[in-house]
Image: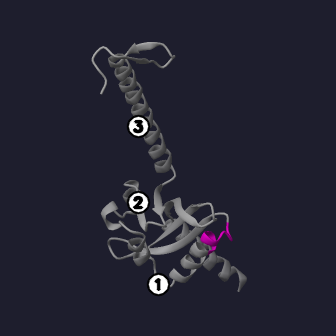
Amino acid sequence: VIERGAMTAGTKGVAQPCGERDADLATRLRQTERRLRELEQRYETVVGAIGESVYDWDIAGDRIVFYASMERAIGLPPEALKTARDWWDRIHPEDQPHYRTALIAHFKGDTPRFECDSRYRALDDSWRWARQNGLAMRDDRGIAVRMMGATGEITELKERERLLAEKSAILET
């Protein structure tokens, strides 16, 4: 317990009353919180500019956070994606083997990052395309324990690729 009028070392090593130190800490905390909010706003602006959203997957703890911008990026609200399994269940069955292979390769360290295009079931039950990128963070033994990355909707891109392939096939015949 610190008594009223007690003195403590200040930020520059000069003794100052505890109340001043507390006020100084509170001011620094407010400044840090303001800077954090500004960084978050910039980050959301950049992620929004590229049409993607971020996820943070605690692999070891089997918890995942899909940021609120996921709804803007791929049309799925945060409550639709609470676990990694929620996302897995939306991946098209034909794409699941490729997705799993890419994920395992990255977890094993065979690839520098996770990257996978796959179809997913949208809220209206249509099939849309998403591109996911991620980077695993590893423990001291090299085991992937966390992965952070981004997800973006690429249905329009995939449709253009399909049309281009069809036109190329016609020209080759």
Where does residue 6 sit, x and y in percent of width and height?
Answer: 34, 16
Q: What residue type is labelled 1?
A: Pro
Q: Which amino acid does label 3 sit on?
A: Arg
Where does residue 26 sit, x and y in percent of width and height?
Answer: 36, 26
Q: How many marks?
A: 3
Numbered circle sitting on residue 37: 3
Q: Which of 16 and 76 is in front in this view?
A: 16
| Quadrant of the image occupied by residue 66 | bottom left
Secondary structure of the residue carrying numbered label 2:
strand
Tell me the magenta residue range: 105-111
- Report which residue position mark 2 lands on: 66
Label located before the other in sequence (3 or 2):
3
Q: Nearer the viewer, mark 2 or mark 1?
A: 2
Q: How far apart are marks 3 and 2 (CA)?
A: 19 Å
Q: Nearer the viewer, residue 22 or 47?
A: 22
Q: Distance between the residues labelled 3 and 1?
A: 40 Å
- Report which residue position mark 1 lands on: 93
Where does residue 42 sit, x and y in percent of width and height?
Answer: 47, 40
Residue for point 67% across, 64% down: 112
